Image (cartoon, rainbow, N blue to C red):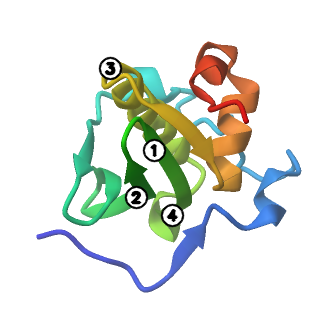
């Protein structure tokens, strides 16, 4: 059964992006693994308008709004129990990889997704230029 912990780290909170906290965009877990080595799968849940990553019975999510050809990321949330393990980064990577495969452009309203794209040049071409 999936637990939905009441305590959550809200990744869209600006204090998480100053580079001094373990929850930042480039966080690694205690073993030094990054998101590409963990093997956890990011899945789209279109009914809830969010990408999800389930780890240790907890669900991390990246909420979005979808319009033809464009996805707007509005919020990213990682349960407190998963904090400091790079789960947010894995979620962002997995979601953006799926967005690319679908041929969508991205509007990163969520500060976490925006920061992730800013630090990973391979995703900057996905951002909708206005």
In what element is the residue under mark 4? strand
Q: Tell me whether the residue at label 4 lies in contact with that at label 3, contact meaning CB atoms closer than 8 angstroms.
A: no
Tell me the mark number nearer the camera, choosing from 1 and 2.
Answer: 1
Q: Residue at x 62, y 32 (%)?
A: 128
Chain-order first, disc 4 or disc 2: 2
Decide: marks 4, 2 in contact (CB < 8 A)? yes
Foreground: 35 or 61? 61
> In the image, which disc is placed on residue 71?
1
Quote the CA–CA distance across marks 4 and 2: 6 Å
Q: Nearer the viewer, residue 81 or 13?
A: 13
First in sequence, mark 4 or 1: give its number: 1
**Dot 3: element:** helix
**Would residue 3 be visible to someone looking at this image?**
yes
Marked residue nearer the N-terminal end (1 or 2) = 2
Q: Earlier in the sequence, mark 4 or mark 3?
A: 4
- Residue drawn at the location 28% of the way across and 56% of the way down: 56
Q: Estimate how packed mark 1 is, as few (under 14), some (14 to 19) or many (20 or more) residues with alpha carbons within 10 Å.
A: some
Per the model, the C-alpha gap separating discs 3 and 2 is 21 Å
Residue located beneath label 3 in the image? 101
Let me know if residue 23 appears in the view.
no
Question: Quick one: SS at disc 1?
Answer: strand
Mark 2 is surrounded, within 10 Å at the Cα level, by few (under 14), some (14 to 19) or many (20 or more) other residues, namely many
- Residue 46, image x and y in percent? 22, 55
Taking the spot 24% from the left edge, 43% from the top edge, the residue there is 43
Q: Nearer the viewer, mark 3 or mark 2?
A: 3
Task: Determine which residue is flagged by label 4.
Answer: 77
Mark toward the viewer: 4 or 1:
1
Query: Which residue is the site of mark 2?
Result: 60
Question: In the displayed structure, would residue 86 be above or below residue 111?
Answer: above
* Dot 1 and dot 3 residues touching (CB under 8 Å): no
């Amino acid at each position: 059964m999936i637990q939905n912990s009441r305590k959550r780290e809200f990744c869209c909170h600006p204090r998480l992006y100053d580079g001094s906290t373990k929850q930042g965009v480039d966080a690694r877990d205690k073993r030094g693994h990054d998101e590409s080595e963990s093997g956890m799968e990011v899945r789209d849940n279109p009914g809830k308008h969010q990408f999800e990553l389930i780890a240790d019975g907890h669900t991390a999510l990246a909420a979005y709004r979808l319009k033809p050809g464009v996805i707007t990321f509005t919020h990213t949330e990682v349960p407190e129990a998963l904090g400091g393990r790079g789960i947010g980064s894995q979620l962002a990577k997995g979601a953006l990889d799926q967005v690319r495969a679908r041929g969508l452009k991205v509007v990163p309203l969520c500060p976490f997704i925006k920061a992730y794209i800013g630090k990973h040049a391979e995703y900057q071409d996905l951002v909708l230029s206005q």
